[in-house]
Image (cartoon, rainbow, N blue to C red):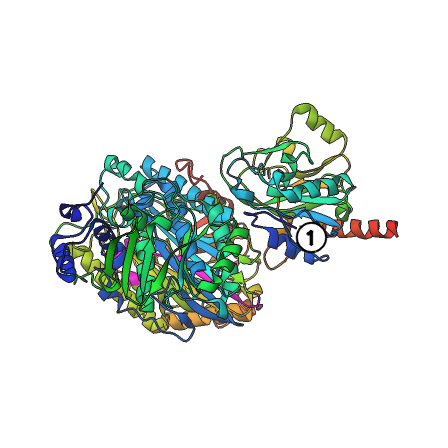
């Protein structure tokens, strides 16, 4: 879990990860990733987001290590502001623009799982093949944008993992895209907050599917390596 | 710019007050001294028209850890944890510049909470504007104030878990922005604001000091607002908020307290350094020397008086033992937060301000903090034959509509329609504690690490207080407690914000006196202590005072958050019970407003002992799990309450109202709609059954649930809430 000054949801994400494994918080100024199996870039307003969401955080020393980790195939999950940071850092395609209605939005939305053949969504595989997840969004700049040809390429290569269910697009995202991964499928960013959907007391538990997917992937990789 | 003696009036001091200062000092005050005194003697800082009245409020209770007089009060919630909370107004700055006014209102109340060592865990807001249908200005104020609250709360990572909004003509020229914050702290981290230990160092934390907010306390907070043009000239007096700086300041302050590096901590609010330093000195019985040359400035050339009264945001003041100053600065460096030693504690009991090696102010702490004259109010009820204080609202209904149409009109009226478009602009879930979000239940519920939970609600109804200030104020306290009962919570304490007009006017003084009397009485009869609060007077516009608007924020405890009832019906076949004696009236109701009735009493009498017993019954029904939903009957009467119970889960109901009960008449804080399994509701006054896809009020009206939802959710003529 990376903590930037201005991160808000890093403790929430840590609590969520601790439901499926161990989790530590890494300081933005440190380069040492402490040998973690996966990195979560959490939500919030890193450095205040005064320039543009995620635009400053991508230059944090820790992000150099995260980029190396990702290029080596390490699992990286970016949530909300973390998604924005990963796009700014060029680790994910596209950009997150201000919401079409120009207001902050909090809403519990339904998400269609488009692909379950990824380290992040594999636990969503079920009959019938698409599972719907109820997870909240909360952001000011969550409108997914990429040029047309890029969008077509993303769709063709199966990089769109999550889509807002019909009628649930809260921000004007193109093609209802809620979450995309890189071509290598080891870096994933999404605007909804799965860490706020892990406890029946405080909401739904559908976010756990994503954390359980990552846990299973890490276990599989460890088995293969051994 | 220098301040001459003739300028005391421009600074808001009366001739008599100035004469008193001269006689106490036995000399004329210097420029810097006069600027400091004018602020400390302003209504906002000295409570000179309300302090005597506030002594009537009960402040002791078994759960109270810290009461009024600190940055925030604190109640014990068990498990070695305390909950700090306070509500504060930022009305006048918001009327001038709503986005920054509301944002810095949130920022200010957050600092009050972490100043006592508590981590802010929730924000609530109470807002008042003019009628949105008729007033573009009110729509603008609402839009920008909501954006400002969201900007600050969302970015700093504190959830906004509840609030309330009312729209009435008397707020057209004087909107109200009250913000409440709750914080959580282990007992051992709680800290008071008293400076102590001569020789200790005074350290200023956080932002640079600039010219923003200069004179805010006297020019803005303690005078009536005028027409739009002169308000714009006051814009430089409104502070600018920086939630990112405050987030760092918050984390830094809590880390300093956890490491036990501070003797005391205080936030800088109204009147800036002057107020926070002199209050710290007064509480500790010490003096302070402050060197203006050491205060880090945002722009060159600030006069000493400007440095002393600047209201630049995101600053805190702490007292540190000399040997720990380096450790404090190291922690602050890590959080990229500025920390500067600007003075020291002395045993002189005087505030000495230095600049360029000269003493520019040398005042006894007592003259700043204690010697401002307190005024007796001269209350007089309005004459029986005099014209009404408030114009009757314009009529939207004739009174001959069928009951179903009346219900739909109430559900879509500005004060009752769903607040979802507003709440959707706030993050209610960050920090992973929120068990009941806005509009899920009558109170927000936050889980504690102990496994138990706290509940919080904020309430106020100015129109009903205008009808009868004493009875209306009592109702507000009971309604807030009723909201807590609906989630199974026992009240621990409350905070209040008293928003009134000019107290020098006899009828406003009467409203204030009666309302405080009612609050004190209600607190006594429910056994709820007042642990802190705020007074905002001079809320007037060209057409007169606002409705008298006491706002109550109440915190309670419940053992099992999983059993906190929602407000909506949950299961077809459940029995619906009316719990509590309910003999409502028409005066002051929403229906009376829609029909253009004059704003006048009387409100229905309240049997306080019976109402307290009803609260206890509802609390036990919820805690035992017998009640699957609970909702208090408030604005719009029992018909609106039932419709609100149908909407969340799209479940209808068949109901037969008790004979003679007016479906739209109101009495607040004493009666509830509760649903549960038929056997669990046995023995209660069962009035109907959950089920179907419409709300059927036998012999009165039948509305499809879809019509109810549409009426609550969307109003084409109200674009801001739509």
Residue B458 on the magenta span: yes
Q: Horizontal and vertical percent for residue B412?
A: 41, 44
Q: Horizontal and vertical percent for residue B246?
A: 46, 50
- Could you classify mark 1 by the number of other residues whose Cα lies within 10 Å: few (under 14), some (14-19), or many (20 or more)? many
User: What residue is shown at x 87% (from left), y 50% (from top)?
Assistant: A225
Q: Image height check: is B229 above or below B340?
A: above
Picture quarter containing residue A77?
A: top right
SS of the residue under disc 1 = helix
| Outermost bottom residue | B62
Q: In the image shown, does B219 or B24 lie closer to the viewer?
A: B24
Q: Is residue B659 in sight in this rendering?
A: no
Picture quarter containing residue B43?
A: bottom left
Side of A217 where B210 appears, left or right: left
Q: Is residue A192 in sight in this rendering?
A: yes
Q: Which chain carries label 1?
A: A
Q: In the image shown, does A7 or B63 lie closer to the viewer?
A: A7
Instruction: Determine which residue is flagged by label 1.
Output: A208
Residue A42 on the magenta span: no
Q: Image height check: is A141 above or below B285?
A: above
Q: In the image shown, does A71 or B488 lie closer to the viewer?
A: A71
Picture quarter containing residue B556?
A: bottom left
Q: So how many labels did they put on this image?
A: 1
User: What residue is shown at x 61% (from left), y 38% (from top)?
Assistant: A59
Q: Horizontal and vertical percent for residue B478?
A: 36, 65
| Outermost front residue | B357
Q: Horizontal and vertical percent for residue B571?
A: 57, 58
Q: Residues in magenta?
A: B449-473
User: What residue is shown at x 54% (from left), y 35% (from top)?
Assistant: A52
């Amino acid at each position: 879990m990376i903590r930037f000054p201005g991160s808000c949801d890093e403790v929430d994400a840590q609590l969520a990860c601790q439901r499926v494994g161990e989790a530590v918080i890494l300081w933005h100024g440190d380069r040492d990733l402490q040998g973690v199996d996966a990195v979560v870039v959490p939500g919030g307003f890193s450095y205040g987001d005064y320039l543009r969401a995620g635009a400053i955080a991508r230059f944090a020393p820790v992000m150099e290590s995260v980029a190396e980790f990702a290029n080596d195939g390490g699992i990286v999950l970016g949530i909300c502001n973390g998604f924005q940071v990963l796009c700014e850092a060029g680790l994910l395609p596209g950009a997150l623009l201000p919401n079409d209605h120009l207001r902050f939005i909090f809403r519990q939305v339904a998400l269609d799982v488009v692909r379950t053949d990824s380290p992040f969504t594999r636990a969503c595989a079920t009959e019938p093949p698409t599972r719907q997840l109820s997870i909240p969004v909360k952001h000011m700049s969550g409108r997914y944008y990429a040029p047309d040809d890029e969008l077509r390429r993303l769709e063709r290569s199966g990089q769109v993992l999550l889509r807002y269910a019909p009628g649930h697009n809260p921000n004007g995202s193109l093609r209802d895209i809620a979450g995309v991964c890189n071509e290598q499928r080891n870096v994933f960013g999404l605007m909804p907050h799965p860490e706020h959907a892990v406890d029946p007391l405080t909401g739904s538990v559908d976010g756990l599917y994503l954390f359980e997917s990552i846990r299973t992937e890490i276990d599989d990789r460890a088995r293969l390596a051994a | 710019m220098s301040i001459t003696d003739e300028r005391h009036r421009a600074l808001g001091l009366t001739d008599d007050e100035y004469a008193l200062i001269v006689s106490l000092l036995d000399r004329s005050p210097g420029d810097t001294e006069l600027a400091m005194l004018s602020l400390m003697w302003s209504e906002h800082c000295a409570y000179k028209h309300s302090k005597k009245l506030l002594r009537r409020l009960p402040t002791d209770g078994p759960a109270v850890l810290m009461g009024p007089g600190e940055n925030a009060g604190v109640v014990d919630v068990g498990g070695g944890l305390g909950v700090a909370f306070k509500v504060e107004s930022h009305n006048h700055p918001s009327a001038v510049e709503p986005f920054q006014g509301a944002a810095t209102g949130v920022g200010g109340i957050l600092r009050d909470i972490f100043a006592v060592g508590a981590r802010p865990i929730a924000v609530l807001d109470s807002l008042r504007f003019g009628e949105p249908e008729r007033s573009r200005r009110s729509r603008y104020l609402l839009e920008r104030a909501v954006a400002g609250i969201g900007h600050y709360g969302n970015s700093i990572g504190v959830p906004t878990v509840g609030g309330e909004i009312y729209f009435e003509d008397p707020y057209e020229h004087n909107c109200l922005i009250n913000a409440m914050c709750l914080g959580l702290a282990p007992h051992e981290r709680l800290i008071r604001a008293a400076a102590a230990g001569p020789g200790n160092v005074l350290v200023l934390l956080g932002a640079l000091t600039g010219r923003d907010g200069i004179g805010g306390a006297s020019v803005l907070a303690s005078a009536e607002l005028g027409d739009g043009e002169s308000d714009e000239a006051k814009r430089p007096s409104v502070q600018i908020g920086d939630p990112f700086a405050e987030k760092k300041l918050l984390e830094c302050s809590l880390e300093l307290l956890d490491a036990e590096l501070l003797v005391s901590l205080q936030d800088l609010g109204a009147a800036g350094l002057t107020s926070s330093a002199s209050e710290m000195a007064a509480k500790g019985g010490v003096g302070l020397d402050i060197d203006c040359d050491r205060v880090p400035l945002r722009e060159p050339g600030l006069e000493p008086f400007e440095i002393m009264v600047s209201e630049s945001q995101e600053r805190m003041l702490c007292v540190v033992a000399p040997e720990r100053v380096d450790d404090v600065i190291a922690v602050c460096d890590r959080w990229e937060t500025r920390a500067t030693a600007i003075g020291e504690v002395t045993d002189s009991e005087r505030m000495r301000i230095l600049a360029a090696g000269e003493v520019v102010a040398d005042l006894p702490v007592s003259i700043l903090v204690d010697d401002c004259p307190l005024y007796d109010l001269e209350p007089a009820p309005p004459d029986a034959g005099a014209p009404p204080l408030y114009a009757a609202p314009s009529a939207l209904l004739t009174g001959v509509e069928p009951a179903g149409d009346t219900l739909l009109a109430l559900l879509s009226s500005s004060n009752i329609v769903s607040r979802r478009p507003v709440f959707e602009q706030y993050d209610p879930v960050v920090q992973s504690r929120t068990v009941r979000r806005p509009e899920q239940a009558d109170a927000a519920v936050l889980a504690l690490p102990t496994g138990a939970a706290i509940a919080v609600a904020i309430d106020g109804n100015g129109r009903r207080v205008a009808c009868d200030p004493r009875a209306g104020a009592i109702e507000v306290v009971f309604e807030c407690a009723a909201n807590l009962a609906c989630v199974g919570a026992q009240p621990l304490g409350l905070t209040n914000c008293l928003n009134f007009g000019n107290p020098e006017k006899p009828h406003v003084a009467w409203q204030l006196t009666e309302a405080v009397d009612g609050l004190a009485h209600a607190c006594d009869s429910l056994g709820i202590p007042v642990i802190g609060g705020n007074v905002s007077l001079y809320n007037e516009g060209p057409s007169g005072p606002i409705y008298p608007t006491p706002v109550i924020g109440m915190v309670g405890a419940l053992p099992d958050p999983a059993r906190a009832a929602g407000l909506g019906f949950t299961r077809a076949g459940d029995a619906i019970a009316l719990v509590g004696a309910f003999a409502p009236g028409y005066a002051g109701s929403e229906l009376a407003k829609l029909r253009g009735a004059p704003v006048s009493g009387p409100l229905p009498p309240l049997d306080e002992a019976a109402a307290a017993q009803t609260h206890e019954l509802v609390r036990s029904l919820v805690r035992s799990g017998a009640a699957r939903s609970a909702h208090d009957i408030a604005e719009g009467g029992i018909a609106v309450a039932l419709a609100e119970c149908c909407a969340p889960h799209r479940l209808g109901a068949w109901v037969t109202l008790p004979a003679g009960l007016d479906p739209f008449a109101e009495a607040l804080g004493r009666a509830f709609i509760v649903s549960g399994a038929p056997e669990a509701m046995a023995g209660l006054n069962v009035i109907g059954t959950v089920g179907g896809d419409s709300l059927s009020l036998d012999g009165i009206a039948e509305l499809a649930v879809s019509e109810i939802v549409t009426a609550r959710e969307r109003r084409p003529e109200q674009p801001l809430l739509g």
